[in-house]
């Protein structure tokens, strides 16, 4: 498997650390209800098909990536920098 | 027998080798199989189950029968295919699965017992009594089972792994692959051409036809010569592409040194990972045998194999050859033989409408129904419309048609599609993204069509990559149509082999169907068809056809054939190359490593690091003596330890302080410049991730220290928090662990020692930090302690680490101090109640370790919300306590704690011990532990039980801080 790091180009899967669903990007605000934290920390979908998850280019540029991929075909559909996503969201 | 003047072998270079203790001679370019056939040796092995005498069936890597052991000084490699192993001077090979000899094999009694050894025999027979399985049946069966044997010694030979990248990977160097590679190479693409054979050319090397007016092997040589001159082409002979994986990644095994008398500096094999923009599957096709009674005698082989032995090796495997086929293609073998002056007794063609005109007799609509000859074929029985007749023959060539070599297209779940016209499976379209099947692998069988298909596939690949294309003119070649009429098994009562390698017959498959193992997957497992080293390459399709017939279904309805990686066996040694012993994991050495080893310190692993365990002195006979002395030395005078393994993260920017407030539970924005603070870091789920000190080196410049164990995890975490939640903050973080060597100096004389190496004496209060210099070199000094004594840590750029360590030790020793290792460091911190990852192991909260007050109520931080969830605090939690043994008794880590009088069982466990050590300071064994409601139980006696070490004792619950509870020494 290979991921196309937006900064480093296509790289072998061994360079990356897998974290989990992109849900981890949506941290509840301070003081949010316990249910919101429970959702954030523990409740995940298990899609057969397109999914978005987080990978860290640990043996490369240290960027966190959001990878859109298909769990059925193993196709990588998009790789984006997490930092860019957050900057766009706040801009 | 050799035919004069034929073949591509180097007749000027004779090669001697040994088979089963007998010396033979062949030529450079021979395989073991071709050289043995040239010497008239036809018996090469025994079959797996019935120990039937077997010869060679094929001339390629799919060989199911002629499996040998290659014997070297220290090595014995089993199940090597005689058709793949090249001969070299001094090669020694041995037949296998026979005793005492290949000719006289005692276990051939299995063949007589065959009526009882049908499919499912073991399942049915060894059911009862149950207890007999482990004690009797299994050991006996295991002894009789298996093929080759190993040397029983470690494999000390060299293997390699390597990585390669290209635009186009061409798999197979026959007509299709050569044309594909040439087309792409001329267009300027970066091309790798890989072929499993020692000599590239594939089927062209066995071909007697012409291409573009020259002999087929010459055309191949001409193309290869051009490719070899191109800088954008890499030719990889002896390289089998073994697997297709995600995103254009392929595994390949190169046999680098297995054809050489001495590998010298070369590895035996190299496992490649090749990443290709596109790939062309030009693997050709494999001929199939036909099943009929006793179709497995030495001398029965594939028609195409006979042609290869003749045209490529100049060898004829018989004097009076017969051919049995269901298609036109096999005729060419007969014609080539006759052109070379070899007698072809008869062609038996199962098709009633087959052409009859050849230079030898042809029986149309006829089949072979049996064979004669125990150790070698002597004759066959043929049934045709006029009746039965016996024909004397010493070599029978079979052709049941061709299966495209589509294995790689199955590696990502692709299911081949049945083609009734070709009576074969074809690759499913798009089965592996980026892999384009071409030529015979895609079901086109004439040389002309293969050339065109290879060129077309390369053009398509280049276009798909947006690469420039160039037209390559196609040379003229043979373009005969392929006509076949399926024939899988000749009806008859005797045993007719489908899977030669695992001794699976037509009867076995029918029995599986009869016993309702009617799905292909069940039939396979019940009969073991397709599960031998050849992985069903010779038998899958025919077995499926027989199953379809037995169950009254068509082939597509019955199922499909599928293949998993690897295409052919890959040695584990090649895949794990470099991963033995010290190569198992990277090794990280401290700058003080050499100095510690010189002093006799045993090194222990801490993650990937190697750290000194203790520094023995003359007269000390146990580690404990050294450890006790080092602890007393730190408490009494001064000790020096290398603490460079701790993670160091440099954090800078206007928002650096704000960032630390967010990742640590406590506040760092209030930390003055030149001061250090202890910080506690949580995971978002409220459990402790790590702890350590962070120094404020400047207004916008911090240096964070992590534990050795969590250095990588913390760096990853900081990067995540920053990029996911603080992307627009003014902030940069980077690991500087490797850049600084850092030494702890601890003890009552620590200040004196530190000042003796500094250019200007420093008078730092506790938890101060700042820049200093040593011999003019900028350094950093931190007044922090992990021992409970007055302590400093001095950091210098790593290149000065060794010099500073040696200097500090020399000075310390004149003061009555010295180096201390991990054992003493551990005892010192246990005496002081300082935690490590033995305690913060991922399941403990700030409350559990008594640090819940460090979670600041004034700000948010990672893990804060979850840390206050119900169940994360309170008397039900197991809390950090100290333990003190009574008298000389020794506590053990991992032991569980129980209330005295309570039954010792899992439900009653009150907690567990995390760290222990003998405290020379207190004269007792001390421990740190987690105990339910532990902080309220100080002074109580608890029962410690360690079933593994057979320890059961009472100990006292205590404050985890045993030494200098007020911290007076720290602050001295």
Image (cartoon, coloured by chain):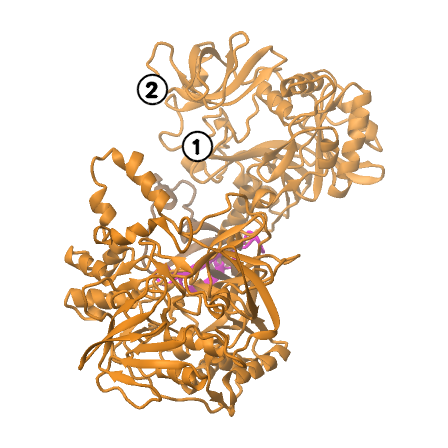
For discs 2 and 1, the disc positioned in front in the rendered view: 2
* Chain ID, mark 2: B
Tell if the residue under mark 2 belongs to the same chain as the one under mark 1. Answer: yes
Image-quadrant location for residue B522: bottom left
- Is residue A19 in the magenta section? no
- Is residue A82 in the magenta section? yes
Mark seen at residue B905:
2
Image-quadrant location for residue B494: bottom left
User: Residue B775: percent from the left, percent from the top?
Assistant: 85, 37
Residue B527 versus residue B419: which sits nearer the camera?
B527
User: Residue B295: percent from the left, percent from the top?
Assistant: 30, 67
User: Residue B577: percent from the left, percent from the top?
Assistant: 56, 52
Image-quadrant location for residue B499: bottom left
Q: Which chain is orange?
A: B
Q: Where's the C terminus of chain B, which quadrant?
A: top right
Can residue B472 be seen here? The reply is no
Mark seen at residue B843:
1
Residue plotted at (69% across, 36% down): B673
Magenta residues span A57-85
Q: Residues within 10 Å of mark 1 (few under 14, many from 20)?
A: few
* Chain ID, mark 1: B
- B577 w.r.t. B590: above or below: below
């Amino acid at each position: 498997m290979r991921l196309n790091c937006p900064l480093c180009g296509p790289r072998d899967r061994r360079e990356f650390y897998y974290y989990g669903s992109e849900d981890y990007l949506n941290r509840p605000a301070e003081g949010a209800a316990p249910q919101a934290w429970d959702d954030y920390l523990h409740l995940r979908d298990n899609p057969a098909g397109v999914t978005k998850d987080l990978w860290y280019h640990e043996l490369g540029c240290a960027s966190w990536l959001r990878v859109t991929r298909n769990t059925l075909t193993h196709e990588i559909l998009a790789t984006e920098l997490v930092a860019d996503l957050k900057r766009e969201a706040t801009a | 027998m050799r035919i004069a003047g034929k073949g591509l072998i180097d007749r000027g270079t004779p090669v001697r080798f040994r088979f089963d203790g007998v010396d033979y001679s062949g030529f450079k370019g021979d395989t073991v199989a071709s050289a043995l056939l040239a010497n008239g040796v036809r018996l090469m092995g025994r079959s797996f189950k019935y120990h039937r005498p077997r010869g060679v069936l094929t001339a390629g890597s799919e060989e199911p029968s002629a499996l040998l052991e290659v014997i070297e000084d220290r090595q014995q490699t089993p199940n090597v295919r005689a058709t793949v192993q090249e001969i070299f001077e001094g090669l020694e090979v041995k037949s296998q699965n026979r005793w005492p000899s290949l000719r006289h094999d005692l276990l051939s009694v299995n063949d007589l017992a065959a009526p009882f050894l049908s499919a499912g025999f073991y399942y049915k027979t060894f059911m009862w009594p149950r207890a007999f399985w482990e004690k009797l049946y299994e050991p006996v069966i295991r002894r009789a089972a298996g093929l080759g044997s190993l040397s029983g010694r470690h494999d000390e030979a060299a293997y390699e792994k390597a990585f390669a990248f290209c635009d186009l990977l061409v798999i197979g160097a026959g007509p299709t692959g050569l044309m594909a590679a040439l087309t792409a190479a001329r267009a300027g693409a970066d091309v790798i051409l890989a072929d499993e054979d020692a000599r590239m050319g594939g089927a062209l090397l066995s071909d007697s036809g012409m291409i573009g007016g020259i002999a087929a092997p010459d055309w191949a040589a001409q193309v290869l010569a051009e490719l070899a001159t191109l800088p954008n082409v890499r030719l990889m002979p002896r390289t089998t592409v073994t697997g297709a994986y995600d995103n254009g990644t392929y595994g390949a095994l190169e046999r680098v040194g297995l054809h050489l008398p001495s590998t010298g500096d070369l590895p035996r094999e190299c496992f490649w990972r090749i990443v290709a923009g596109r790939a062309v599957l030009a693997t050709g096709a494999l001929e199939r045998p036909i099943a009929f009674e006793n179709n497995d005698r030495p001398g029965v082989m594939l028609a195409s194999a006979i042609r290869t032995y003749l045209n490529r090796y100049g060898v004829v495997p018989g004097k009076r050859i017969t051919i049995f086929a269901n298609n036109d293609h096999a005729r060419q073998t007969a014609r080539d033989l006759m052109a070379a002056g070899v007698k072809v007794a008869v062609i038996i063609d199962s098709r009633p409408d087959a052409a009859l005109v050849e230079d030898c007799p042809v029986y149309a609509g006829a089949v072979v129904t049996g064979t004669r000859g125990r150790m070698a074929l002597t004759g066959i029985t043929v049934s045709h419309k006029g009746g039965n007749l016996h024909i004397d023959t010493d070599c029978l060539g079979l052709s049941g048609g061709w299966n495209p070599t589509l294995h790689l297209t199955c590696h990502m779940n692709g299911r081949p599609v049945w083609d009734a016209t070709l009576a074969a499976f074809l690759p499913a379209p798009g089965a592996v993204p980026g892999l384009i099947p071409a030529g015979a692998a895609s079901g086109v069988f004439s040389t002309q069509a293969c050339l065109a298909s290879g060129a077309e596939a390369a053009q398509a690949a280049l276009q798909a990559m947006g690469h420039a294309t160039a037209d390559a003119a196609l040379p003229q070649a043979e373009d005969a149509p392929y006509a076949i009429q399926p024939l899988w098994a000749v009806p008859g009562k005797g045993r007719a082999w489908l899977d030669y390698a695992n001794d699976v017959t037509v009867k076995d498959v029918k029995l599986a169907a009869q016993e309702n193992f009617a799905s292909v997957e069940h039939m396979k497992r019940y009969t073991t068809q397709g599960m031998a080293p050849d992985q069903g390459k010779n038998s899958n399709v025919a077995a499926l056809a027989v199953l379809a017939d037995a169950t009254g279904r068509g082939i597509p309805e019955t199922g499909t054939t599928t293949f998993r990686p690897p295409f052919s066996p890959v040695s584990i040694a090649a895949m794990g190359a470099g991963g033995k012993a010290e190569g198992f994991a990277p090794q990280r050495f401290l700058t003080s490593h050499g100095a510690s080893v010189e002093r006799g310190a045993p090194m222990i692993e801490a993650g990937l690091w190697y750290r000194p365990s203790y520094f023995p002195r003359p007269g000390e006979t146990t580690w404990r003596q050294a450890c006790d002395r080092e602890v007393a030395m730190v408490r009494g005078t001064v000790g020096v330890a290398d603490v460079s393994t701790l993670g160091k993260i440099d954090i800078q920017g206007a928002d650096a302080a704000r960032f630390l407030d967010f990742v640590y539970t406590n506040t760092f924005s209030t930390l003055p410049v030149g001061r250090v603070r202890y910080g506690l870091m949580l995971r978002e789920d409220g459990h402790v991730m790590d702890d350590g000190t962070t120094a404020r080196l400047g207004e916008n410049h911090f240096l964070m220290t992590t534990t050795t164990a969590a250095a990588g995890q913390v760096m990853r975490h900081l990067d995540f928090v920053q990029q996911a939640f603080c992307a627009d903050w003014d902030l940069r973080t980077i690991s500087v662990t490797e850049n600084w060597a850092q030494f702890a100096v601890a003890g009552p004389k620590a200040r004196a020692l530190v000042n003796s190496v500094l250019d200007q004496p420093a008078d730092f209060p506790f938890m101060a930090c700042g820049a200093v210099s040593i011999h003019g070199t900028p350094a950093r000094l931190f007044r922090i302690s992990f021992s409970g004594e007055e302590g400093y840590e001095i950091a210098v750029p790593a290149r000065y680490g060794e010099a500073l360590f040696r200097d500090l030790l020399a000075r310390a020793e004149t003061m009555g101090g010295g180096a201390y290792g991990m054992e003493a460091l551990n005892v010192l911190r246990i005496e002081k109640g300082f935690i490590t990852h033995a305690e913060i192991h991922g399941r403990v909260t700030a409350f559990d370790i008594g640090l819940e007050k460090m979670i600041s109520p004034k700000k948010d931080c990672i893990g804060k919300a979850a840390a206050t969830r119900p169940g994360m605090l309170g008397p039900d939690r197991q809390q950090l306590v100290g333990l003190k043994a009574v008298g000389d008794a020794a506590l053990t880590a991992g032991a569980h704690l129980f209330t005295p009088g309570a039954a010792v069982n899992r439900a009653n466990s009150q907690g567990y011990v995390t760290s222990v050590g003998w405290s020379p300071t207190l004269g007792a064994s001390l421990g740190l532990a987690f105990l339910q409601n532990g902080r309220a139980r100080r002074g109580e006696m608890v029962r410690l039980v360690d079933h593994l070490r057979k320890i059961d004792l009472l100990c006292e619950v205590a404050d985890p801080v045993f030494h200098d509870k007020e911290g007076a020494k720290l602050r001295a």
